[in-house]
Image (cartoon, grey):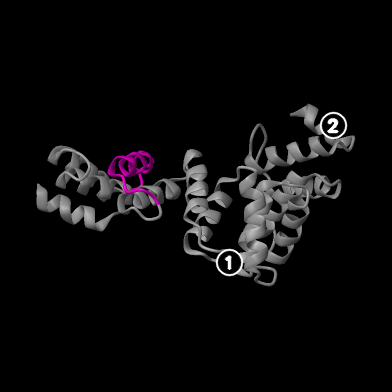
Amino acid sequence: MKYYQLAAKQGYSYAIYNLGLMLYNGKGIKQDYQKAAKCFYLAAKDGLAAAQYNLGLMYYKGIEMQQDFEKAAEYYQLAADQGEAIAQSDLDYLYDNGMGLKQDHIKAFGYYQLAADQGQVIAQYNLANMYQIGRVVKQDDAKALKYYQLAAEQGHVDAQLDLGKKYFSGNGVKQSYLTAIEYFQQAATQDDAEAQFILGVMHLNGIGVKPNKRMAMELLRKSCENGKQKACELYRQLK
């Protein structure tokens, strides 16, 4: 800790930024959002993209400062222009929803693309949705599938669930209960109530698997515990 402080006093922007992170997270030091914001500001002035992003995030959330979407957009933009993927992803969200700047779906798509191509999982998922429904861009099942898969591989639970549904129904892909089950299981492992419910129904009715009431009830019970009301109702009927 003291070495970060010494380096920060000498004006090293990375040290100042890292000190800000420690203050923000309360890691190895007492949490202090006000001091964290000051560190991020100093490092952001030196052009450090990560600091610019984190300062933007504090403005976006209104942490130790008045919530200000315009300021958030300003700092996200600075970081995004340096290729910071998460800043690009958050900036496209602001453009998409007209928060702090004029709504512009085309610019939002552009930043989603930049961030997705750098492996930013939320951008990959949002880009998949845009291709899936043909929003701003021409509807494209192949590209939607590509970005859903990229996001799912990184553990994005909604992407896993959506892929399961695509393969279950054959929407834009060759229908496959086996592949659908694989994706539903990935999402269910992350306690996604919808995936657990669908798997429960599939095991109950023998869709893509041998009928297994015990397994179905276990999945429905978990889905119910995770807030799926239909799962609760069906589970009670089966008891």
> Which is more N-terminal, label 1 or label 2?
2
Whether residue 175 appears in magenta in the rendering, the answer is: yes
Q: Which structural element holds mark 2?
A: helix
In terms of depth relative to the viewer, which is nearer, 82 or 67?
82
Q: Are marks 2 and 1 in contact (CB under 8 Å)?
A: no
Whether residue 195 appears in magenta in the rendering, the answer is: no
Q: Which structural element holds mark 1?
A: loop
Q: What residue is pinned by disc 1?
A: 136
Residue 74: x percent and y percent? 76, 60
Identity of the residue drawn at 70% across and 49% down: 54
Identity of the residue drawn at 61% across and 65% down: 96
Residue 171 at least partly seen: yes
Q: What residue is pinned by disc 2?
A: 7
Q: Amino acid at mark 1?
A: Val
Instruction: Give the residues in magenta.
Output: 173-193
Residue 17 falls left or right of residue 231: right
